[in-house]
C-alpha cells in the first residue's frame, strides 16, 4: 500500500501544530500587514491579527510562494512518502489552487491537487477525510476523485456584525453601511462552491441565526440526503471571527435542531476575517465521504 501524505493550508483552520500531531502537513498562509509579511500561526496569531485590524492596519492576503510549496513537497517525498494529496482553499477564492496544479505538473502524478471548493471548517474536514481515506488504502488519485465528486456536498452561511470592513474594501458603499448600522441589518453571506455570495439580510442576530439554521437544514434535506439523529452522516460546524462565546452559544442552539450531532467550532480563517472583521458567526455542514464513518479526531463535541 502506498504511503500517502495529506497537505493543506491554514485557511482550513488546522494549525501547523495540530497538523503535526495528527499526520497532516500544513502550509502557513502569508499576509501583508502595513507592508510587512506575516505567516499565519507562525508570527501572526489570531490575537495579533485582530489587534492590527482594530487599529486600521492595511491588511492584504497573499499566496504561499512557489518555492515554499515545492520545498515542502520535496521534503515529504524525502521522508519516504509515495504520493501527496494537496488540498488548498477554493479556487474561486484564491489562485493558490491553480498555482498548485501548475507546480504538480512536474511530479508525474505523484502530487494530486484537490479542487473541491472548500474553505475554513469544510476544508478542514476534507483534510481529515483525505487522511482517513489514505489510511484505508485509497490511492491519491482516488482520494482526489472522491473529494471533488463531493465538492457541492457542503454549505457555509456567515452573518456579519459590521459592514465597515466590506466598506473599506469597496464592496459596500459608505451610505449602505451607515443605513445597515442604523437599521441593525445583518447581511448573511454564503459559500456554495466557488465563491462568497450574498444570501439574505435581516434585522438582528437572533433572526440571522434562525435564517442560517433553516438554510442549512434545507440544504441537508434537499442536497445531502437528510439528517438521521440515530446515525448522523453529516458533519456540522460553527465558525466565527473573534466571537468564541457567541459561537459556543450558537452551537448549543444548533444541537437542538440537529440532535446527537457532533459539532466542531473554529475561528474563520484570517483570509476571510480581513474582509468581514470581528464579530461574525458562521454555520457549515459537509457530508461524510463515501465509506467514511464519523471519527472523533475530526470533531469536537459541544456540551
Image (spheres, grey):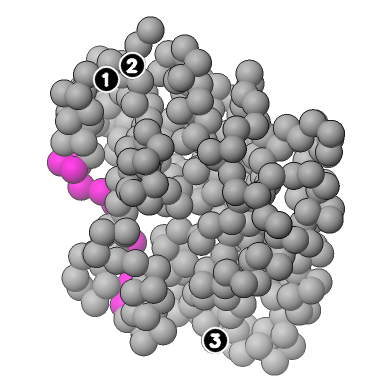
Residue 14 highlighted magenta (yes or no): no
Question: Which secondary structure, mark 1?
Answer: loop
Q: Is residue 258 above or below residue 206?
A: above
> Which of disc 3 and disc 1 is earlier in sequence?
1
Residue 64 horizontal side relative to residue 290, left or right: left
**Circle nearer the viewer, 2 or 3:** 2
> Which of disc 1 and disc 2 is earlier in sequence?
2
The magenta span reads: 58-68
Residue 84 horizontal side relative to residue 244, left or right: left
Residue 225 is situated, as x and y percent measured from the top left of the image, at 80, 31
Looking at the rendered image, the quarter that the C terminus falls into is bottom right
Q: Around disc 2, counting alpha carbons within 10 Å, would you say few (fewer than 14), some (14 to 19), or many (20 or more)?
A: some
Residue at the image point whose x is 30% and y is 45% from the top: 27
Q: Which residue is mark 1?
A: 81
What is the spatial separation of the Cα atoms under label 1 and label 3, in whole angstroms? 52 Å
Q: Are marks 2 and 1 in contact (CB under 8 Å)?
A: yes
Residue 303 horizontal side relative to residue 245, left or right: right
Residue 40 is situated, as x and y percent measured from the top left of the image, at 31, 59
Q: Which residue is mark 3?
A: 174
Q: Which residue is mark 2?
A: 3
Residue 6 is situated, as x and y percent measured from the top left of the image, at 37, 30
| Residue 176 appears in the picture as rendered | yes
> Which of disc 3 and disc 2 is earlier in sequence?
2
Question: Which secondary structure, mark 2?
Answer: loop
**Viewer-nearest residue: 152 or 253:** 253
Q: Around disc 3, counting alpha carbons within 10 Å, would you say few (fewer than 14), some (14 to 19), or many (20 or more)?
A: some
Any mark on residue 186, and which? Answer: none
Question: Which secondary structure, mark 3?
Answer: helix
Amino acid at each position: 500500500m502506498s504511503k500517502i501524505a495529506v497537505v493543506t493550508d491554514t485557511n482550513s483552520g488546522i494549525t501547523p501544530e495540530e497538523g503535526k500531531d495528527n499526520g497532516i502537513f500544513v502550509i502557513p498562509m502569508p499576509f501583508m500587514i502595513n507592508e510587512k509579511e506575516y505567516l499565519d500561526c507562525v508570527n501572526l496569531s489570531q490575537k495579533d491579527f485582530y489587534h492590527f485590524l482594530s487599529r486600521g492596519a492595511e491588511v492584504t492576503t497573499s499566496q504561499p510562494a512557489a518555492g515554499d510549496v515545492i520545498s515542502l513537497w520535496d521534503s515529504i517525498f524525502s521522508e519516504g512518502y509515495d504520493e501527496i494529496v494537496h488540498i488548498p482553499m477554493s479556487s474561486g477564492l484564491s489562485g493558490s489552487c491553480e498555482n498548485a496544479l501548475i507546480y504538480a505538473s512536474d511530479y508525474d502524478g505523484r502530487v494530486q491537487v484537490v479542487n473541491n471548493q472548500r474553505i475554513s471548517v469544510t476544508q478542514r474536514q476534507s483534510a481529515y477525510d483525505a487522511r482517513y481515506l489514505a489510511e484505508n488504502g485509497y490511492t491519491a488519485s482516488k482520494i482526489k476523485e472522491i473529494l471533488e465528486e463531493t465538492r457541492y456536498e457542503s454549505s457555509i452561511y456567515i452573518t456579519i456584525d459590521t459592514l465597515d470592513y466590506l466598506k473599506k474594501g469597496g464592496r459596500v458603499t459608505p451610505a449602505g453601511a451607515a443605513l445597515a448600522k442604523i437599521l441593525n441589518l445583518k447581511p448573511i453571506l454564503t459559500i456554495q462552491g466557488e465563491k462568497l455570495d450574498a444570501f439574505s439580510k435581516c434585522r438582528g442576530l437572533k433572526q440571522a441565526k434562525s435564517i442560517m439554521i433553516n438554510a442549512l437544514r434545507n440544504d441537508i434535506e434537499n442536497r445531502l440526503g437528510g439528517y438521521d439523529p440515530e446515525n448522523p452522516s453529516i458533519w456540522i460546524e460553527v465558525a466565527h471571527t473573534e466571537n468564541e462565546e457567541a459561537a459556543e452559544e450558537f452551537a448549543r442552539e444548533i444541537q437542538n435542531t440537529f440532535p446527537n450531532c457532533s459539532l466542531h467550532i473554529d475561528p474563520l480563517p484570517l483570509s476571510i476575517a480581513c474582509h468581514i472583521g470581528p464579530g461574525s458567526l458562521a454555520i457549515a455542514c459537509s457530508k461524510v465521504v463515501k465509506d467514511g464513518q464519523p471519527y472523533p479526531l475530526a470533531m469536537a463535541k459541544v456540551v
